Image (cartoon, grey):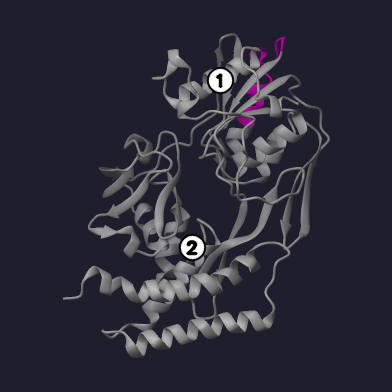
Amino acid sequence: MQGPLSRRLPFLLLSLALVLPLGGALVALDRPGKEPDDDSLYKYLTVFTEALGLVRNAYVEPTDPERLLARALDGAMDALGPFALFVPAEGVKPYLAAAKVGTGHSGVRLGRERGVTFAVRVEEGSPAAAAEVEPGDILAMIGPDSTRDLAHWEVEARLAGPAGTRLETEWIHHGKPRKVTLELGPYPAAAPTLREERGVAVIRLPWLGEAQVAHFETLLASPLVQRRPRRLLLDLRGTDGSDERLAYRVAGLFADGELGRLTARGKVLERFADESPDRFRGELVVLVDRATIGAGELLAEALRERAGARLVGRRTFGYTGREENVALTGGGRLRLATAFYTGPTGEVSDAGLVPDLKVEEESGRFGDKDVPLSELTLRKGLALLLGEEKLPEKQAA
């Protein structure tokens, strides 16, 4: 009987052969201003071909060359980033069907790193949120299958199954496995909300879609937000969006001038600016965390650089790529970032935004050691707005 190691060894061999040299070339191609020369690319392809031939001729059991190639390319996509993937020709039809659903039946955006599938963000009111899946949780099993033995597109396709599907899964939460049943189905996109906390206007903006941005503009003009002294706490924790351009539209409600760029291979493809009258001029604090990604990150960055906002919370995820599905001559597809959106400085970074005031588990004082991190972050943001909390000295300027 073929054991787990013998099943995975061809994939591991080829993944190493491809991800280390060829993956490096692909990363260089994907990043602006870095392009391998023809000789180096030929060298990478030679190493890959040699490894493929060695596995086919010397491995202890017969192997399927097409499956080996598909899994090796899946590993190479892993080297490009958490959302890049390869889809073989036979998987294109189910993949495209799943792509139309996206996260609309599960509410969890997945990433992959070093073969590990994890939750990047969980949408409010979704099946994943109802099942208490949290950002950072590792998806270990779907039914009887380990996610390590599935291509990333297959994992996404299963979470985009028909409405009414009960999906048995296992997640690793803080190092402990947990069985979770996801009842797949559509759910309404979370809308912006406005409330008052300690005399401060607090707007929660969980998603940047056309309807949500229009609603946000209405909330921003409300008397609660516009009264003096003007202080606003904008909660962008877990915020993403359907279109990164909407981030610049929202940023234009607080500041003018250049707000960001779309870049590829060191060239500026498009600039985003706003010269319309601002809706809010006042003190602004923005809450962020590891699930603040894409449009949410762009908005936070533009507000800090152009509107003087102070960021409170945890480092953001660090991804603002414009993804495209690229058709291959053999019928397969690649999903990868072909350009990157940036903030006003035009710098592309996958390290995320570092908050001006970091809030970690150990940030609480003696009296609030048992306060959940989400509540502690809110308290810190309010205290900073009210002058009760100061930034670290090296960041105060």
Query: Which numbered circle lies on residue 121?
Result: none
Taking the magenta stretch, the answer to whether it contains residue 225 is: yes
The relative height of residue 310 versus residue 3 in the rendered view (above or below) is above
Residue 235 location (% of width, % of height): 57, 27
Q: Three-letter amino acid code at disc 1? A: Lys
Lateral position of residue 229 relative to residue 22, left or right? right
In depth, the one of 188 and 288 nearer the eye is 288
Residue at x 45% of width, y 38% of height: 123
Q: Position of residue 185 (x, y in %)?
A: 35, 44
Which quadrant of the structure image shows residue 45? Answer: bottom right
Residue 174 falls in image quadrant:
top left
Which residue is at 42% across, 76% downward?
Answer: 14
59 vs 305, left or right, is: left
Picture disc at residue 78: 2
Q: Relative to residue 216, is residue 43 depicted above or below? A: below
> Is disc 2 placed on a helix, strand or loop?
helix
Highlighted range, magenta: 214-229
Q: Position of residue 253 (x, y in %)?
A: 73, 30
The overriding secondary structure of the stretch rendered in magenta is: helix
| Residue that numbered label 1 is attached to | 380
